[in-house]
Image (cartoon, grey):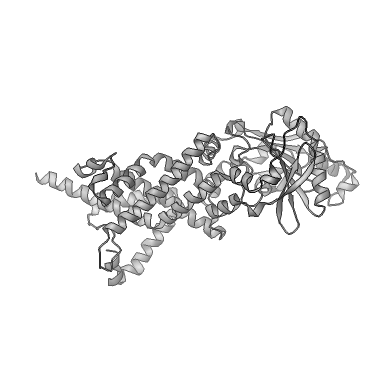
Amino acid sequence: MEQTSQKQQTAKVRYFLTWRWHFYAGLFVVPFMIMLSLTGIVMLFDDEIEIARYEQILSIAAQDSAKPVSQQITAVKEAYPFASVTQFVASNQADVANRVSIRYEDGRSLFITVNPYTATVLGEIDRSDSWYQLANDIHGTLLIGQWGDYLIEVAISLSVLLLVSGIYMWLPTDNASKAGFMKIRVSSGTRILVRDIHTNLGGVLSVVLLLFILSGLAWAGVWGAKMVQGWNTFPTYYTWGEKPKSDLTHASLNHGSEEELPWNLELAALPESKVLAEAEDHSGHHGEESFEQHNLKTYPLDDVIEKAKLMGFTQFKVFMPRSDTGVYTVAANSMAGDVIDPRDDRTTHFDQYSGEVLVDVTWQDYSVVAKLMAAGVSLHQGDVSIVNKLLNVFFCLAFIIISITGVVMWWVRRPKGRATLGVPARFEQEKIWRSGLVTVLVVGLCFPLAGATIAGVALLDWLIVRRSERLQAYLA
């Protein structure tokens, strides 16, 4: 009997310890979870929103044959003589205009819409003014740059701790938890109803949330770029071989915060023109004058596109050479929404003077993690199908509901008329604290910013809270 009582006491201590961690993590995570879900919904319907906003300059009448892409770009250059063309985006619908991206010296970037059947310029879209761009900037940086990225990474990393602790409390271990497991008790009062919605919705969607967390974290500045992405970037020396390599990376081809190149290529160096490098080596001339001295002619863009189509490209973007040493880059990337199936991913670089294929990267060249990332991001962005998109809307709304019900649960159970935060009770027991500490350390090591945050909070607790009776009472 005494042994049973001891087990019950241990279970109670463990539950309340888990609840405290869940509570503290939730305090930080909830606002970010709501923000990410709301901006995520906006980003899911980017195409529909843009078509509605710019219908007059995007919608066209489909015809049998289109003008050469070079003629369409010439029309743009004539209309915008003081800007440089950086990108051509082929439309995936016969009744929607093509887009040509231009950039001014001050960094301003515009999409110029062109009727492919008449090579007529229809209008312009400020790329920085799109709802997607705004939602994406909030989603990724809170509009405050790198520090915003760090804050979001901390929140998403702590979501893992929130997820683990939530699942532990959700699984039925006693009569009370069994009574509400996989049930929504509508007639048992507001507190029970809200608790059932929060725990069951969170528990059932925990795997989905984990997939969103991991695919989202792969874009983050520390866990993604420094840890995971860095280890899955192409080793350009071996992949590109002896071909000339630029100081620029693939990420330099992106426009603003839009991720237009594959994740595993972003940190890899771009190749440079092999023809120009060989001509310079042969003559011994180097520098900006070498292009004119060698009298090289740019390979026709239409021929590059024709080659790309023969290689299997259907829907694609063409990135123009940025300099005399640059290359044409034709990309069909599931992360950018060019193609639906990540197995159709392809990024090909063509020499701008000879049209020779310098580098051709396909799905087969991706590492295992890069393949998982590509598939995960396609699902994350709702690009696979309309069902995928609608399910993601449901998931975003569900995450908002989980967050709000968590706040409501705290509000309902908080002590009335007392200067206290309403933190779940603390029960001291050495072994339980050790097991809890191990869990937190594992999460902290796997997700560095979460670990740094937990360590920082522990330091503040030791330096400030432990020395203030008022704070101790408030956080008791």
Q: Where is residue 174 shown, x and y percent of the image?
A: 20, 42
Residue at 47% over, 53% down:
35
Residue at 55% over, 48% down:
225
Q: Is residue 264 left or right of residue 416?
A: right
Q: Which residue ends up furthest to the left in the rendered image?
A: 1
State the residue in front, 190 or 333.
190
| Quarter placement of the C terminus | bottom left
Q: Is residue 249 left or right of residue 115?
A: left
Q: 13 above or below 366? A: below
Q: 363 above or below 39? A: above
State the residue in front, 9 or 232.
9
Q: Is residue 342 left or right of residue 208?
A: right
State the residue in front, 275 or 131.
131
Q: Is residue 338 left or right of residue 471?
A: right
Residue 279 location, quadrant: top right
- Please indicate, yes or no, whether residue 161 appears anywhere in the rendered image: no
- Please indicate, yes or no, whether residue 41 appears anywhere in the rendered image: yes
Residue 178 location, quadrant: top left
| Quarter placement of the N terminus | top left
